[in-house]
Image (cartoon, helix red, strand yellow):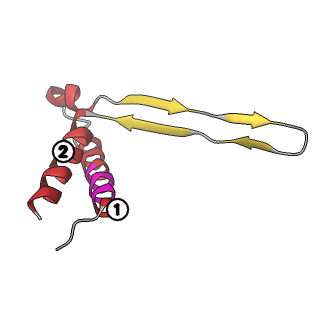
Amino acid sequence: MRKNGWVLVLFVVLGLVAGTLVSHWLGQVPGLSFLTRPLEVSWSPAFDIAAISFSMTLQISLTLLSIAGAFMAIWLYRKM
């Protein structure tokens, strides 16, 4: 199978989502709080001129489990 960059991006996004879901499910377990504590990063570029205004917000919430999911997705991609 020929490897494609878009497939890698898809794998990483799916790995992040899977890790976030596991983190959400394990959020109530007190002993695993270090794995489920989110680090939130946001970026809000905006501009406003007389005729056009533009604003966008990108917010990323990362946990150790979501990062582990992304690394697992990269590993699976390389094994293909």
Q: Residue at x 53, y 40 (%)?
A: 58
Q: Residue at x 19, y 51 (%)?
A: 74
Please provide percent x and percent y for residue 40.
42, 29
In the rendered view, does 53 fall on the left or right side of 31?
A: right
Q: Main secondary structure of the magenta part?
A: helix
In this picture, is 72 found above or below 80? Answer: above
Tell me if residue 10 is in the magenta stretch.
yes
Q: Is residue 6 above or below residue 46?
A: below
Name the residue carrying label 1. Answer: 6
Q: Report the residue that reaches farthest toward the front.
A: 2
Q: Which mark is residue 16?
A: none
The reply to whether the magenta stretch includes residue 24 is no
Query: Badges 1 and 2: C-beta atoms under 8 Å apart?
Result: no
Q: Residue furthest right?
A: 50
Of the 4 image quadrants, the one containing the C terminus is: bottom left
Boundaries of the magenta span: 8-15
Residue 11 coordinates in the image, percent (x, y): 27, 58
Expressed as whole percent of the image width and height from the top left, the position of residue 30 reads 19, 28
Q: Residue furthest bottom?
A: 1
Indicate whether 26 appears above or below 75: above
Relative to 37, residue 21 above or below: below
| Tag shown at residue 71 | 2
Label 2, residues with CA under 10 Å away: few <14, some 14-19, many ≥20? some
User: How dense is the environment of label 1, judged by Cα within 10 Å: few (below 14), some, or many (20 and up)?
Assistant: few
Give the mark nearest the N terminus, 1 or 2: 1
